[in-house]
Image (tube, grey):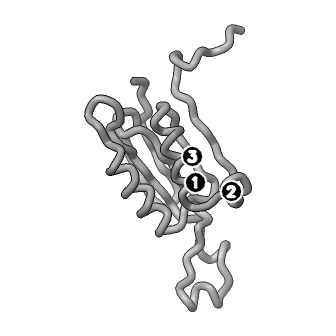
Amino acid sequence: MAEAKPQDGVQIDLISGEQMDGLTSMEKIRNILDGVRDGKIVVLEEGLSPDEESRLIEVTMTEISPDEFNGIEIETYPRSETSDTSFLDRLMGTQSTKKLTVIGPANQIETLHKDENVISALVTRQ
């Protein structure tokens, strides 16, 4: 069986929470944006904090250029709060970053459907 060449499809990077744990917020954002700028779809096992997501969008907006980078599409769904947080965390309103996040180039990924259990996206080649 022939090995697929990068231009034959779309590369998806599935990044574990452990890999992201040792990085600063800006290192996480830079790694995500570098991957997306290369045309990859990035899937984060544990997602980003709300502040990190806001910063990712902010940095993305400064890097958009019509000929090179169209921006990102980002979809997140939280895991069940009852299974991932303690009663005290829920009572205090503590938000968990344990959620699946899908990030890709805006011109290659389109969200078709999203609910509490499924993210359906259409991914196209450039």
**Residue at left offset 65%, top offset 47%:** 15
Give x and y (percent) for residue 5: 59, 15
**Mark 1 belongs to which amino acid?**
Lys
Disc 3 and disc 2: Cα gap in Å? Answer: 14 Å
Q: Residue furthest top?
A: 2
113 relative to 11 in the view: left or right? left
53 relative to 64 in the view: left or right? right
Give the quadrant of residue 99: bottom right
**Mark 2 belongs to which amino acid?**
Gly
Pointer 3 residue: 31
Which secondary structure, mark 3? helix
Pointer 1 residue: 28
**Mark 3 crowdedness (10 Å alpha carbons): few <14, some 14-19, many ≥20:** some
Pointer 2 residue: 17
Give x and y (percent) for residue 65: 29, 37
Where, quadrant-wise, is the N terminus in this rendering?
top right
Give the quadrant of residue 111: top left
